[in-house]
């Protein structure tokens, strides 16, 4: 069995599965039960100045029969007294010395406030700190959460203040509500961040009730924007993790967050550069015990791959992720329909006809049976037909030898501008 333990910027954990700072890490009771279930670490529900949370605060987007495809909340940080949280952190750490406990922090952007809270939480034995610059709703009037996280200079300054007194590793948690997340990530690193975590929730409005015309959720008829998370945000989170992982100006370990619910999601985030991962919505939906399946699945996967340690996954897909301009324009795939598996639903034909390149012909075979066949010379290999096809194995996307050497858009531009004459005219797309 492979070694699942990780070391994220000096924070050691028996496995890469951490609970994200959120309702499942609100109390010592919960975090201790999570550790008993198998979670390797927990980022405590964000500690800070006293807040009051609204009563109606969660909403979900159910899509096509899948409950909680996306989750929306207008909750702020912890509404429990700091002393109570600190006492419970101390007790939990004592019971679980080998598990990772990270204190998530959010205070006003003032040096003395950061110094004070860092000293207080480190005194109870946390393994690391996570600075929450991501909460998209509320507290902006006090310059906290995303209001801070959207200003790179403020992220850098606050990280510096924390590092002035911190004795444990500092993770900076990033907001996705920004044009280019790598800019903020780089500023966090300039401020001394030992690691970054991403993503926090995405600005959202879960819906509008078409009968009452109220927003969902609403507090006595009045709504406000919330933070979106859960399976729906995974592709956004993964791309932001990938951007940070390949950015040379970032270069610190990543704790990946956003829509993770299965061991396969964990593998994807690790391949894309995460040293460990955090989960919130999937636990709110299914409970702590989902970690059992995650541990088993990851163990089996690593054994099948012949890997001795989960850390061997970290970043392996990063070199395979680049810019559009570096993709080979001479690479060619075409769709091939496999009659044996086709159930004749015609969805591929409609998709290609109405939304792609009109190259799936309706023919009749020698036995007089209606069949569909792709005209390969006109197929652009867009994948749409295989995406809409409901029958496994009915459409294969097959790579063909295009007969010409690979050429990217960037190389093509070089050729055109006469900088590189080593390609023949036929090879220039
Ligand atoms: C109800 C709720 C409360 C949250 N509270 C916090 C918080 O206090 N601090 C924080 O850093 N993130 C908070 N988050 C964000 C999560 O930690 C996490 O970044 C986000 O939900 C994405 O992960 P997921 O898709 O696994 O839910 C909260 C999320 C939810 C749903
Ligand atoms: S891959 Fe695209 S272009 Fe080719 S047959 Fe399918 S839908 Fe049509
Ligand atoms: S979508 Fe798939 S199953 Fe349906 S007709 Fe096309 S190949 Fe056959």
Image (tube, rainbow, N blue to C red):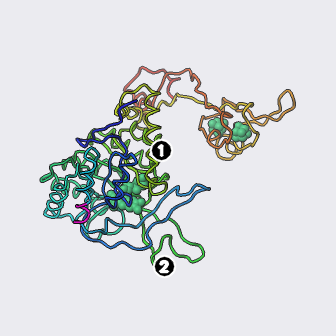
Q: Which residue is mark 2?
A: 221
Residue behind mark 1: 262
State the extent of the magenta-drawn residues as a range: 83-87
Taking 136 as reference, is 382 above or below it? above
Foreground residue among 205 and 3? 3
| Residue 385: assigned label | none
Q: Based on the picture, tell me whether residue 6 belongs to the magenta stretch.
A: no
The one nearer the camera, 224 or 86, is: 86
* Residue visible at 42% across and 27% down in the picture: 415
Q: Is residue 361 above or below residue 130?
A: above
Q: Nearer the viewer, mark 2 or mark 1?
A: 1
The x and y percentages for residue 257 are: 38, 49
User: Considering only order in the chain, which callout, 1 or 2, is on the residue closer to the N terminus?
Assistant: 2
Q: Quadrant of residue 272?
A: top left
Q: Is mark 2 within 8 Å of ligand 1?
A: no
Residue 302 placement (x, y as % from top left): 43, 31
Whole-percent x, y for residue 384 in the image: 62, 41
Taking the spot 14% from the left edge, 59% from the top edge, the residue there is 115
Secondary structure under tag 1 reads: loop
Note whether ligand 1 is within 8 Å of mark 1.
no
Give percent across and percent down for residue 240: 38, 47
Does dot 2 land on a helix, a strand or a loop? loop
Left or right: where 108 falls relative to 375: left
Magenta stretch: residue 85 in it?
Answer: yes
């Amino acid at each position: 069995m492979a070694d699942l333990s990780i070391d994220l910027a000096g924070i050691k954990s028996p496995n890469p599965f951490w609970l994200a700072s959120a309702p499942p890490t609100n109390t010592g009771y919960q975090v201790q039960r999570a550790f008993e279930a198998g979670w390797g670490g927990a980022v405590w529900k964000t500690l800070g100045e006293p807040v009051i949370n609204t009563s109606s605060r969660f909403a979900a987007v159910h899509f096509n029969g899948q409950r909680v495809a996306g989750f929306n909340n207008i909750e702020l940080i912890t509404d429990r007294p700091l002393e109570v949280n600190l006492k419970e952190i101390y007790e939990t750490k004592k019971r679980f010395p080998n598990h990772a406990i990270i204190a998530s922090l959010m205070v006003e952007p003032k040096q003395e406030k950061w110094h004070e809270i860092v000293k207080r939480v480190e005194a109870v034995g946390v393994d690391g700190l996570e600075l929450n610059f991501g909460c998209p709703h509320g507290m902006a009037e006090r310059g906290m959460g995303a209001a801070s996280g959207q200003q790179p200079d403020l992220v850098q300054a606050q990280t510096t203040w924390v590092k002035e007194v911190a004795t444990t590793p500092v993770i900076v948690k990033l907001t996705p509500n920004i044009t280019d997340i790598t800019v903020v990530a780089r500023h966090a690193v300039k401020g001394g961040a030992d690691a970054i975590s991403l993503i926090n929730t995405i600005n959202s409005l879960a819906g509008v009730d078409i009968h009452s015309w109220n927003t969902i959720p609403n507090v006595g008829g009045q709504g406000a924007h919330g933070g979106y998370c859960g399976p729906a945000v995974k592709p956004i989170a993964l791309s932001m993790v990938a951007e940070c992982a390949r950015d040379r100006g970032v270069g610190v370990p990543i704790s990946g967050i956003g829509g993770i619910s299965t061991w396969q999601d964990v593998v994807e985030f690790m391949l894309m550069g995460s040293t460990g991962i955090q989960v919130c919505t999937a636990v709110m939906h299914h409970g702590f015990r989902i970690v059992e399946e995650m541990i088993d699945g990851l163990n089996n996967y690593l054994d099948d791959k012949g890997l001795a340690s989960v850390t061997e996954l970290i970043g392996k897909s990063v070199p395979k992720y680049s810019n559009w301009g570096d993709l080979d324009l001479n690479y060619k795939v075409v769709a091939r329909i496999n009659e044996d598996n086709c159930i004749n639903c015609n969805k591929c034909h409609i998709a290609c006809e109405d939304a792609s390149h009109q190259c799936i012909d309706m023919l009749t075979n020698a036995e007089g049976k209606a069949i569909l066949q792709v005209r390969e010379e006109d197929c652009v290999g867009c994948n749409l037909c295989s995406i809409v096809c409901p029958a496994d194995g009915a459409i294969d996307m097959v790579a063909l030898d295009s007969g010409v050497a690979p050429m990217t858009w960037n190389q093509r531009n070089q050729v055109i501008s006469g900088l590189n004459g080593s390609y023949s005219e036929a090879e220039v797309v």
